[in-house]
Image: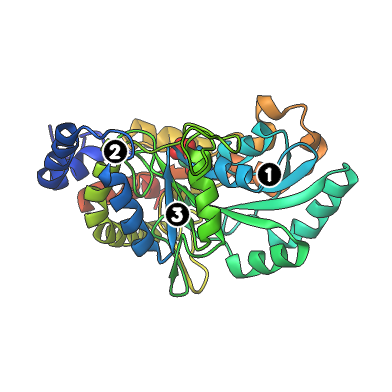
Amino acid sequence: MSTDTAPIPFVDLQAQRARIADRLEPAMARVLEHGRFIMGPEVIELEAELARFCGVAEVVSCSSGTDALLMPLMAWGIGPGDAVLVPSFTFVATAEVVAMLGATPVAVDVREDTFGIDPELLPAAIEAARALGLAPRALIAVDLFGLPVDYERLGAFCTAEGLHLLADAAQSFGGELGNRRVGALAPVTATSFFPAKPLGCYGDGGAIMTDDADFAATLRSIRVHGQGSDKYDNVRLGLNGRLDTLQAAVLLAKLEVLEDELAARRRIAARYADGLGDVVVVPEEPAGRRSGWGVYTIRTERRDALQAHLSAAGVPSMIYYLKPVHRQTAYRDHPWGAAELPVSDALADSVLSLPMHPYVSDAQLDRIIGAIRGFHGR
Ligand SMILES: *Cc1c(COP(=O)(O)O)cnc(C)c1O
């Protein structure tokens, strides 16, 4: 097959597997050998390695990014009568965990340039929550597509308002703000190890990062059915929320090449920006913020026609997100039904995500960029 017509993968997990097979396969075989599939030694080692990577005191691994969002809310005792501020332009899990606990997600619009929650709109969101008779308790900030939000500003706001701040870093693992890494930017950070995320395993997985040892102890209790110091005594409601030992072994092997993979993502993002910046709106990193480039998302008013053109040229693309959370069927009768979220609605019509993973080749980049320029007659 000629390289100019071979299909381009959107995310290429097999290229990564070929690169790390010599450490990955023995690591998985060791788990099969020792047989400690639940909370085995690899889980403990992974938590220590992740803490070192992020520069935090405590990492609590768990069964998914969704549970990594749910568990801190449970630890804070969030429930009926409480409001949690969430961006309206995000993956549905960000709002779902709030609703799951009987609390009310209050949607806040995002900024068009960074895709992050708009800090200017937070005071009005607090007022809207109070007008519904709810107690504002927390804010979940999402580092959408990999770019850390302005945690300094959001942190100050949350402190002033007495809100817990939870970072949804499912797409931004490896990103940075100043000289600190994602995981250390908010008091509590949730991330996901879903296979397509910047650090992904071979199934579902997630982790919570914090410097607060007492909070981490509560999360560890919630992770195993709310167990107390004695495993036959359950002191609170919890989950079966553990990360499998096999997945921890996979993640340890992948962590060894993560630094290099993040550099590759940055190189690819720079090539896209150079090649496309004059024909579509390319994502930018505000001063001091470094994206983890979990997803590469451009904006264009001719999105649907461009996507059809790319598809005909064998270039895959995805729309994250065609339906913002406030447009999802499950939330139709939610109090935010009447809310105006114009930026989220506009983004839903104009975003297009391009292949982004550390192994996009130069030839593939030339093809993708060429196809987009060709569509614009440039
Ligand atoms: C992927 C993702 C999640 C959920 O992670 P899972 O591991 O799939 O449960 C939550 N929030 C955002 C922004 C995500 O991209």
Tag shown at residue 77:
1
Q: Residue at x 51, y 38 (%)?
A: 227
Query: Disc 1 marks which amino acid?
Result: Gly
- Depth check, mark 2 against mark 3: the one in front is 2
Could you tell which of marks 2 and 1 lies nearer the N-terminus?
A: 1
Q: Nearer the viewer, residue 318 or 119?
A: 119
Could you tell which of marks 3 and 1 lies nearer the N-terminus?
A: 1
Could you tell which of marks 2 and 3 lies nearer the N-terminus?
A: 3
| 95 over 298 or under it: above or below | above
The answer to whether 57 appears left or right of 138 in the picture is left
Circle 2: element type: helix
Tag shown at residue 172:
3
Q: Position of residue 239 (x, y in %)?
A: 52, 33
Q: Nearer the viewer, residue 351 or 74?
A: 74
Q: CA distance from mark 3 to mark 1?
A: 26 Å
Q: CA distance from mark 2 to mark 1?
A: 29 Å
Query: Disc 3 marks which amino acid?
Result: Ser
The answer to whether 115 appears left or right of 45 in the picture is right
Q: Position of residue 95 (x, y in %)?
A: 64, 39
Label 2 within 8 A of ligand 1 by Cβ? no
Circle 3: element type: loop
The answer to whether 323 appears left or right of 133 in the picture is left
Q: Residue at x 44, y 58 (%)?
A: 58
Circle 1: element type: loop
Number of residues whose C-alpha sits closer than 10 Å to that of mark 2, classed few (under 14), some (14–19) or many (20 or more): many
Most extreme residue toward the top, as rendered?
A: 329
